[in-house]
Image (spheres, rainbow, N blue to C red):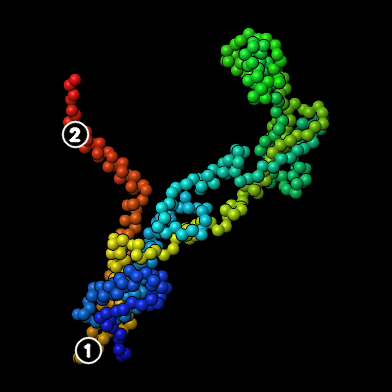
Amino acid sequence: MANIPIWPGSSSFFPGETPFGFYDDDIEFAIDSEKVADFCAKRLGYPLTDIELQSANFFTAFEESVTTYGNEVFAYQASQNFLSLEGSPTGSNLNYKLQKPNLGTQIRIAEAYGSEAGVGGTVEYRTGSIQMTAGQQIYDLQNFANSISASKNNIEVKEIFYQSDPAIVRYFDPYAGTGTDIQGLLDVFGFGNYSPGINFLMMPINYDLAKVQAIDFNDTIRKSNYSFELVNNKIRIFPIPNRNQKLHFKYILKSDRNIPTVSGSLGSGVVTDISTVPYTNPTYSNINSIGRQWVFEYTLALSKEMLGYVRGKYGTVPIPGAELTLNQSDLISAATSEKTALIERLRNYLEETSRTKLLEKKAQESEYLQKDLSSVPYTIYVG
């Protein structure tokens, strides 16, 4: 059997000895690499037993542990702030930057409702018109759809400009001629030119409201009011037109509503999912003692795993008069459980610092403080 390389008892770190070299230029990483290698070797039993690993194995485990720590921390940060990060540029590094909430994603969601309400959004409102014919009451928009190279099912009419004049334009100014220039106040709204300058008795404002409602009810009940009925893009006009004229309307193309991506510059070079959030590997020198202790323990677990695989390759080692069975299964089993426990512990740490948890703790602290203060005797002041 070939000689098994064993741990020589010490190591010296030089840039280029880790697989990826993410942290080789960090002085503190280089210093701790040698210390971690010594720590892991001794925790695995050196010098009482031979350790079939070299310094490169410990350095590799150390680099992977730092990367895993950064991945867990930044992945949690990305998930906590993704609503604010979505749509932001991917060119800026977010490592160690305080992030502030914004309403960008919520507004983009609300734009869909704005499109339906006709007050903005991402769906373009288009204008069109059809020619009405005297005596014809029902009009199908199929011909209009054909004229714009669209199918009838792809058109949705949102607004039709076929309404009677508002009641206020047919109502006289009750204060005209009083000398208070109240008629001029209506000019601000464009209504002054509809009120002739005649005298009225000054009445309370509720009288004006009742008159406006009366005009609307009169148009609706006592005479055929200008109106329409729209069903499946077929328009029924009330009353039946008595002259040839155009009917104007606003419409959308349903295909515009179904476009799933954001158009323009916002759709490229921005954060679209968790994989495009601009986080990079952590800076080892910025990791505090709490984080470094986790990294050391995770490095030890990885070293156990590697040692287990190495010993599993050799199986048994011959000794005078017998064979020595190596503890491969024990090492791999222990390493697997330790890695899982460490990841869960780190995630629990992160979860305890979430906004929700911190606000809950703050609320509990305030509640307990109020209970504590309520037991303090109140001072009675005698004047």
Question: From the viewer's perspective, is 98 left or right of 365?
Answer: right
Image quadrant in which you'd find residue 34? bottom left
Image coordinates for residue 350, horizontal then vertical, percent: 34, 55
The mark that comes first in sequence, 2 or 1, is 1
Residue at image coords 36%, 51%: 354
Secondary structure under the numbered disc 2 in the rendered image: loop
Tally of numbered tags: 2
Q: Which of these two is toward me, 180 or 276?
A: 180
Image quadrant in which you'd find residue 296? bottom left
Q: Name the residue tied to disc 2.
A: 375
Location of residue 213 with respect to 95 vertically, above or below: above
Question: From the viewer's perspective, is 223 left or right of 355?
Answer: right
Residue at image coords 41%, 73%: 21
Q: Amino acid at mark 2?
A: Ser
What is the number of the mark on residue 157?
none
Image coordinates for residue 190, horizontal then vertical, percent: 67, 25
Q: Amino acid at mark 1?
A: Ile
Q: Which of these two is toward me, 378 or 296?
A: 378
Question: From the viewer's perspective, is 143 left or right of 374?
Answer: right
Residue at image coords 46%, 59%: 93
Is residue 320 visible to the viewer in this orientation of the structure?
A: yes
Image coordinates for residue 241, horizontal then vertical, percent: 78, 28
Location of residue 78 with respect to 304 vertically, above or below: above
Is residue 211 visible to the viewer in this orientation of the structure?
A: no
Q: Name the residue tied to disc 1.
A: 319
Question: From the viewer's perspective, is 32 left or right of 185?
Answer: left
